Amino acid sequence: MDDGVDPEFGRSMKPPSRAYKILTPPFVAMKWVIVPLHNGGGLRANTRLQILDVYGNVIPGLYGAGEIIGGTCGEVT
C-alpha cells in the first residue's frame, strides 16, 4: 500500500480514494452487519398481479408488484 496500490485488489489508493493508512494508535475495529429490510407480508394478488380484497375478489384497476404483494420477491396466489 505504500506505493498507492491496494495489493489485494489492485486498486489505486491515491486521492480521491477514502482509503488511507492509520499509523498512530489507538486502533479501533468495528463489526458491521448488513441487515435486510423488507416487508414480510403485504397485499394479496393473483397471477395477473391484480390486488385481492379480504374475500379473495379482484379490486378493479388495482395492481401490485414486488414486495407490496408479500414476501421478499413478491409471492402471488
Image (spheres, grey):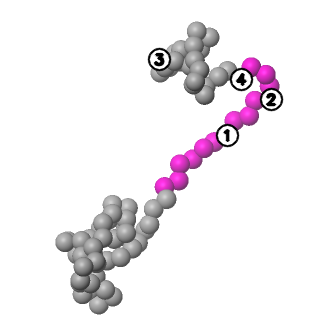
Q: Which residue is mark 3?
A: 10
> CA–CA distance between discs 4 and 1?
15 Å
Residue 72: x percent and y percent? 38, 61
If you read the primary sequence from the N terminus, does the residue marked by circle 3 or circle 4 appear first?
3
Residue 68: x percent and y percent? 37, 69
Kindly identify the amino acid type of the residue bearing the numbered disc 2: Pro
Q: Is 35 placed left or right of 67 in the picture?
A: right
Q: Nearer the viewer, mark 2 or mark 4?
A: 4
Q: Which residue is mark 4?
A: 22
Q: Nearer the viewer, mark 2 or mark 3?
A: 3
Which residue is pictured at 26% across the width and 84% down the height?
59
Kindly identify the amino acid type of the residue bearing the numbered disc 4: Ile
Q: Which residue is mark 1?
A: 30
**SS for dot 1:** loop
> CA–CA distance between discs 1 and 3?
24 Å
Residue farthest along the top direction in this orientation: 3
If you read the primary sequence from the N terminus, does the residue marked by circle 2 or circle 3 appear first?
3
Q: Quadrant of the C terminus?
A: bottom left
What residue range appears in magenta? 23-36
**SS for dot 3:** loop
**SS for dot 4:** loop
Which residue is pictured at 19% across the width and 72% down the height?
48
Q: Nearer the viewer, mark 1 or mark 3?
A: 3
Kindly identify the amino acid type of the residue bearing the numbered disc 3: Gly
If you read the primary sequence from the N terminus, does the residue marked by circle 1 or circle 3 appear first?
3
Residue 77 visible, this angle: no
> CA–CA distance between discs 3 and 4?
19 Å
